[in-house]
Image: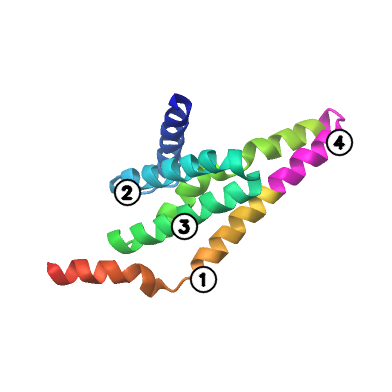
C-alpha cells in the first residue's frame, strides 16, 4: 500500500516537473499533478487485473477526461493538462530497453520490449481519440450551472 502512495506522489512530482519544462503557468501545477498522480494510480491498480495495454488505455481515458474537465473549469486549453498529465504513462523505459537490447544483440528481448512499448503507445493514442470524440458540451454542463449560481 505504501508503494502505491510513493509511486503516485512520484508521478505527481514528475508531472509538475514536465509542466515546468513545457512552460505551463504555475497556477495550473496542482491540477496537472492531480491528473498525473491519479492516472498513474489507476494504471497501478488495473495492472494486476489486466494487460499493460488495457491498463494504459484506461489510465489514458482518465487523463483525458480529467484534462477536459479542468480545461473547461479553468477556461484554458486542454493541452495544458493533457501533455503534462500523460507523461507518467509514456513508455520511455520500454523504448530505451528495446534500443539497449538491440545494441547488445539480444534481438528476441528487443522485439518483445519494443512491441510492448508500441502497444502502450497505441493504447495512449486510442484513449485520446476515444475521449476526444465525446462532445465538448458534456464537459460544459456542470460549468454552466456553476456560473449561473454566481
Q: Position of residue 98 (x, y in %)?
A: 75, 37
- Left or right of residue 34: residue 62: right
| Circle nearer the viewer, 2 or 1 | 1
Give whichever of discs 3 and 2 has the lower sequence position: 2
Local SS, label 2: helix
Circle 3 sits on which residue?
64
**Residue at 45% across / 47% down in the picture?**
22
**Range of residues picked out in magenta:** 102-118
**Residue at 51% across / 71% down in the picture?**
133
Circle 4 sits on which residue?
108
Q: CA distance from mark 3 to mark 1?
A: 11 Å
Circle 1 sits on which residue?
133
Circle 2 sits on which residue?
28
Q: CA distance from mark 3 to mark 2?
A: 16 Å
Q: Position of residue 99 (x, y in %)?
A: 76, 36
- Residue count near mark 2 (Cα–Cα under 10 Å), binned few <14, some 14–19, many ≥20: some
Amino acid at each position: 500500500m505504501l508503494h502505491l502512495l510513493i509511486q503516485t506522489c512520484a508521478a505527481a512530482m514528475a508531472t509538475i516537473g514536465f509542466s515546468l519544462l513545457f512552460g505551463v503557468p504555475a497556477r495550473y501545477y496542482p491540477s496537472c499533478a492531480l491528473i498525473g498522480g491519479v492516472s498513474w494510480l489507476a494504471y497501478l491498480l488495473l495492472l494486476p487485473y489486466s494487460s499493460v495495454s488495457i491498463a494504459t488505455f484506461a489510465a489514458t481515458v482518465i487523463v483525458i477526461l480529467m484534462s477536459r474537465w479542468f480545461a473547461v473549469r479553468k477556461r484554458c486549453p486542454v493541452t495544458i493538462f493533457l501533455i503534462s498529465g500523460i507523461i507518467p504513462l509514456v513508455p520511455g523505459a520500454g523504448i530505451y530497453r528495446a534500443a539497449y537490447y538491440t545494441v547488445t544483440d539480444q534481438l528476441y528481448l528487443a522485439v518483445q520490449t519494443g512491441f510492448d512499448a508500441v502497444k502502450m503507445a497505441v493504447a495512449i493514442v486510442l484513449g485520446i481519440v476515444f475521449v476526444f470524440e465525446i462532445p465538448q458540451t458534456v464537459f460544459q454542463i456542470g460549468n454552466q450551472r456553476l456560473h449561473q449560481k454566481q
